[in-house]
Amino acid sequence: MKKLGGKEIAEKIKSNLTAEVKRLKSKTGKAPHLIVLQYGEDAASKSYAQRIEKNCKKIGIEFEYQQFIEEPDKFKSCLKDANEDARITSIMVQQPLPPDLMESLEMINPQKDIEGITSASLGKLFVGLETLNPATAEACMEILDYYEIPLKGQRAVVVGRSNIVGKPVSILLQQRHATVTMCHSRTRDLEWELKHADIVVAAVGRAEMIKGEMLNEDSIVIDVGTNFVEGKLLGDVDFDSAADKVKSITPVPGGVGTVTNQVLMRNIVKSFKNLHGIK
Ligand code: NAP
């Protein structure tokens, strides 16, 4: 079994971005600037924002964080201002959001939508136009490419159909000529689908749900899952049993998540360049 680690890929992206941000600063006199908006007090969202801040600082990206508690109008008005403020080049609205604020995600200026979550960004991805793609989906592709895993004509099974991971990764795989099967909670025979896959992308959110015996010997497994169980980070795939069986697999931690962090940074730099008309 080959372990498809993400650390080297992430380091490479990070060092390229650090040099690029330096160049952009000397060319424009400005730096990419991210604002993260949080509504409510979700502790996991807050610590995620702190991690993003650290990553931004290392690369030279400016970071700003605003938290709102029971002030929906203030939250919306801050989002509107961020759309209009030329200094702010990237916007992230943290989820979970209360149901009545979910539609505010659509307010994000698609050019600043570094998570690729607006219908405008996802629509462009769907029709194959250049856009800011959801970072996790792109990180999966980055790993497959880094390890030179052939995609054309391969059977890829994506487990999970969320707008932020499962669906976008299925589109990216199809763009690269893989034959994609989408599985979800109502799939009749998940094990049969997995057994016939060359590539498996697991994005379910259920710790170690996919066991080695459900996979085939030749499969390549990309585990997107991040599940905290008793303080331990676990994937959607049972790594130990799968590692004994499959050809290669991403670890959790140290796999998709590690690459996603840097792909998100790359989207921040991309949005800055797009807004400044820099190729
Ligand atoms: P989500 O929105 O909750 O979607 C989960 C998907 O899994 C749904 O489509 C659901 O099917 C499907 N599912 C649930 N139970 C299933 C079962 N028993 N068999 C087959 N499919 C099942 O989750 P998400 O936001 O896509 O996240 C998925 C995982 O990736 C989570 O662990 C999350 O923490 C992780 N994640 C990691 C990164 C990273 O950078 N590494 C980034 C984002 C998310 P239905 O549609 O039928 O309900």
Image (cartoon, rainbow, N blue to C red):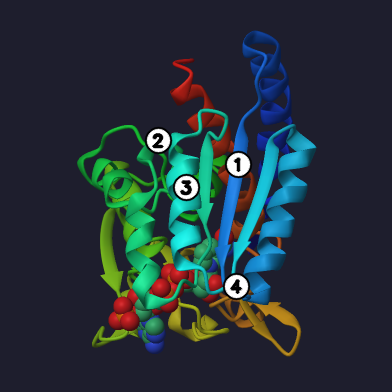
Residue picked out by circle 2: 111
The label shown at residue 138 is 3
Residue type at mark 1: give it: Leu
Q: Would residue 93 be found to the left or right of residue 164 on screen? A: right
Mark 2 or mark 4, which is nearer to you? 2
Dot 1 or dot 3, earlier in sequence = 1
> Label 3 to label 2, Cα distance in Å?
17 Å
Q: Are marks 2 and 1 in contact (CB under 8 Å)?
A: no
| Residue 51 quadrant | bottom right
Q: Identify the residue at image location x=38%, y=41%.
A: 109
Dot 4 or dot 3, earlier in sequence = 3
Residue picked out by circle 1: 34
Mark 1 or mark 3, which is nearer to you? 1
Mark 1 or mark 4, which is nearer to you? 1
Dot 2 or dot 4, earlier in sequence = 2
Instruction: Name the secondary structure under disc 4.
Output: loop
The label shown at residue 226 is 4
Q: Would residue 28 be found to the left or right of residue 22 on screen? A: left
Q: Identify the residue at image location x=77%, y=49%.
A: 54
- Label 4 neighbourhood size at 10 Å, few (<14), some (14-19), many (20+)? many
